[in-house]
Amino acid sequence: MKILVCITHVPDTTSRIAFSADGQSFDKTGVQYIIGPYDDYALARAVELREAQGGELTVLNVGPAETEATLRKALAIGADKAIRVDTEPVDSFFVAQQIAAIARQESYDLILMGRESIDFNGGQVHGMVGELLGLPSFSPVMTLEINGDTARMTREIEGGKEPWRPNYRWCMGCQE
């Protein structure tokens, strides 16, 4: 099984953030960065799946060189390889296009990412990636089990949970 997990490089929620003098950006001095919490959950699920099913787990980040530490952390957690698209993630659609371009080259069985990033909270990328690749997209996925060629997942809906049994090859936004 080939699994792609897309991760974001976001400010740690415990970091103190101050704005620049002009008020147009934030001052990055002293800010620690982490893998986005929802992406971290997706990565943990992917590691479990890879260990149970075998295969290869790749992490992908769209971002400049400063995101390398985040990719190294993902490798330490259990990813087999890492890819960084060296560009500024200017908006959700641009990021989705970059992810889809990489995914087309490798034909991954599963594409996982957090349901949203904690810096912009857009929650759009997984759906856009699915659309660009012609794959179904599910979010927010809370549980995922794969047994041979059968998959079962649960996603959160208003007022409850919804079970799904998707066919292989899909994109999903994860949450705990």
Image (cartoon, rainbow, N blue to C red):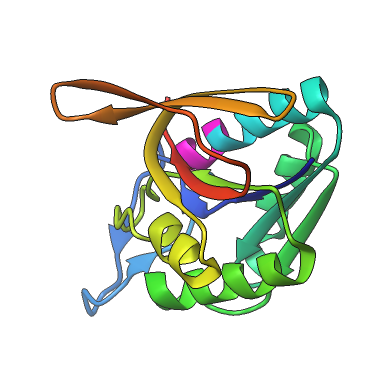
Residue 130 percent coordinates (x, y): 48, 60
- Span of residues in magenta: 36-41
Quarter of the view holding residue 55:
top right
- Res. 56 in view: yes
Task: Judge from the rendering whether residue 104 lies leftward or rightward of residue 112; answer left or right.
Answer: right
**Foreground: 165 or 89?**
165
Residue 36 in picture, x, y percent from top left: 49, 44
Q: Nearer the viewer, residue 59 or 159?
A: 159
Where in the figure is residue 68, as x and y percent of width and height? Answer: 72, 59
Camera-side residue: 126 or 1? Answer: 1
Verify whether residue 157 appears in magenta: no
149 w.r.t. 129: above or below: above
Residue at 76%, 71% in the rendered image: 105
The residue shown at (64%, 75%) is 101
Q: Is residue 63 visible?
A: no
At horizontal 79% and vertical 42% (from top left) the residue drawn is 75
The quadrant of the rendering that contains the C terminus is top left
User: Does 46 appear above or below 17?
Assistant: above
* Quadrant of residue 149 within the rendered picture: top right
Relative horizontal placement of residue 56, taking residue 94 as reference (left or right) = right
- For the stretch drawn in magenta, the main secondary structure is helix
Pick the residue in front: 154 or 50.
Answer: 154
Query: Which quadrant is home to the N terminus?
Result: top right
Number of marks in the rendered image: 0
**Is 154 situated left or right of 1 in this image?**
left
Q: Is residue 130 left or right of residue 43?
A: left
Q: Name the residue furthest left.
A: 159
Residue at position x 63%, y 61% from top?
61
The x, y position of residue 143, in whole percent, is 48, 22
